[in-house]
Every structure is written in structure tokens, then in C-alpha cells.
Amino acid sequence: MQLSKPVLQAENLRKVYAGRPAVDGISFFVSSGEIVGLVGPNGAGKTTTISMILGVLAPDAGSIHIGGLDLAHNRAAALSRTNFAAVYAPLPGNLTVQENLRVFGMLYATPNLSARIDEAIAEFDLERFRRTRCGVLSSGEQTRVSLAKAMLNEPALLLLDEPTASLDPSTARDIRARIRAFAAKGRGGVLWTSHNMPEVESMCDRLLFLSQGRILLEGDPKSLAARNGHASLEDLFVAVANA
Ligand code: ATP
């Protein structure tokens, strides 16, 4: 069920590599205030999907609308409404926390940038690292900076590719709370990939189960396993991965 106006609408998205579809005609949406989990085995097509939504990969077919804007025809305006964080996309290590936030804030044309940087630094508890180069921060600290950068322009669509991978349980809990708070404001939606099934179950309002480039299952993560005859999401995941 679609609750409010979608911030992301993907229709029949497809990407083929060397004759083999990595993403095979998928359609889905993310609404404002919603956290949607994109899960699936290694190679299922999650990162390919996110790369197409980010505009770094051109789909072979299908369409993507962000905040109602067609990414193919209104690229700059559509992308200015998104932001992104992933462990495999660290911020430049030779820039300080403040410099990184300023550079990315300018790239996203963030209004009242100095004030937004101060707010983000306070929100993510980064004051003592403000003038520290990002390259020397720990993984957990770098993730906090990446999320501060990802929320700086108050995106309508926040894309998070395994944001808690490699974090200790306490830092991961802290990061989850901040992402939940972002969604709870109701101004943006989140598309989240993770291999951590308990995390997905506790965080996501809705789950898209991707396998071999297709959405096999979709629904409430709290009931999806039982509805498909499995005791837990992890059991369901293993069954889908081995199908
Ligand atoms: P993981 O959980 O391992 O990160 P994923 O679900 O993100 O996996 P993708 O990275 O989207 O999966 O890859 C989907 C499929 O597309 C894989 O079979 C992968 O080998 C293939 N693929 C991805 N990028 C390319 C590329 N540039 N050239 C050829 N094949 C690619």
C-alpha cells in the first residue's frame, strides 16, 4: 500500500551486462517517511539498482522519478533531492570533516550551508572532529560523517548501501537511531540495503527481496517470513538465496 506521495518511483528498471540481466525489469516505490529495505543475496542487483537511482549508471530500460521528477529528463533537479552513504564510498580522507561537509553541501546547493553544517556536526556528535582529516577517523566516526553529509541537504530520498556494515553493535545502534529520526520527520524516505536480517526487521517498514535481478517478495518484514512458511527472515533469506 502506498501511504503518501512517493519520493522514489522506479518502473520496469533493467540493466544488462554482457547479455545477462543484473536488474531485470523491477518496479517499486519509496514514500516519504518510509524506510524500505532492499535485500538479497550477493550479486542480486542491489548496488546496480542504487547506482541507477543515483544517476551514475544509465538503465537499459525503465524510468526513475525522484520527487516526481524524471531522472532521465531532469537530472540535476532530481539528483539535488537525493543523497547517499555507503562504506565503499568514503569521503575524501585529506579533507577535514568541516571541509568535506562544505564541499558536498556546495555540490548539493544546500541553502544556509554554514548553519546546516553546524547543525549536522551537532546532530552527529562531530564537534571534536570538526578540524580532523576524515582519513584518520575510525570506521564508526567516518560513518557518522558520511551520514551527516548524506542528510546535509535534507534529501527527499536517502540511499544507504549497508550503512552499518563493519560497525560495532553500539555504534550501529546509534546510527540506526539517527536514520530512524530522519525518516520520522516525514520529509524524506530511505532506501536501505543490508545483509543484517535482525536489523532489517527492526528498521524497515517494508522489504523488497531481490534475487537474480527480480523482486521475488515484498512486504512487512515482521510478517514476511511467516507468510512464506519460514521461522525467521534469515531462514527466508537462505531459502531465497539457494532457490
Ligand atoms: P552484493 O550484495 O554482493 O553487493 P549486489 O546485490 O549489490 O551484490 P550487484 O553489484 O548489483 O549485486 O551485481 C549484480 C550482478 O551484476 C552481479 O552478477 C555482478 O557480477 C554483475 N555486475 C555488476 N556490475 C557489473 C559490471 N560493471 N560489469 C559486468 N557485470 C557487472
Image: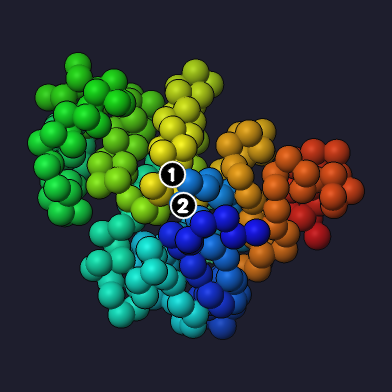
- Name the residue furthest front: 4
Q: Does residue 189 appear left or right of residue 146 in this picture? A: right
Q: Quadrant of residue 127?
A: top left
- What whole-number distance in Å separates the C-alpha atoms at marks 1 and 2? 6 Å
Would residue 24 be found to the left or right of residue 188 on screen? right
**Mark drawn on residue 32:** 2
From the image, tell me which residue sits under label 1. Answer: 186
On the question of residue 40 being in view, the answer is no
The answer to whether residue 154 is visible is yes
Under mark 2, the amino acid is Ser
Does 99 appear above or below 139? below
Is 19 located above or below residue 84 in the figure? below
Q: In percent of the image, x 52 and y 48: which residue is there?
A: 34
Residue at image position (25%, 42%) is: 152
* Residue 95 position in % (x across, y down): 14, 36
x 21%, y 42%: residue:
92
The residue tagged with tag 1: helix, strand or loop?
loop
Which residue shows up at 89% across the image and 48% down it?
229
Task: Check if mark 1's residue and mark 2's residue have beta carbons within 8 Å.
Answer: yes
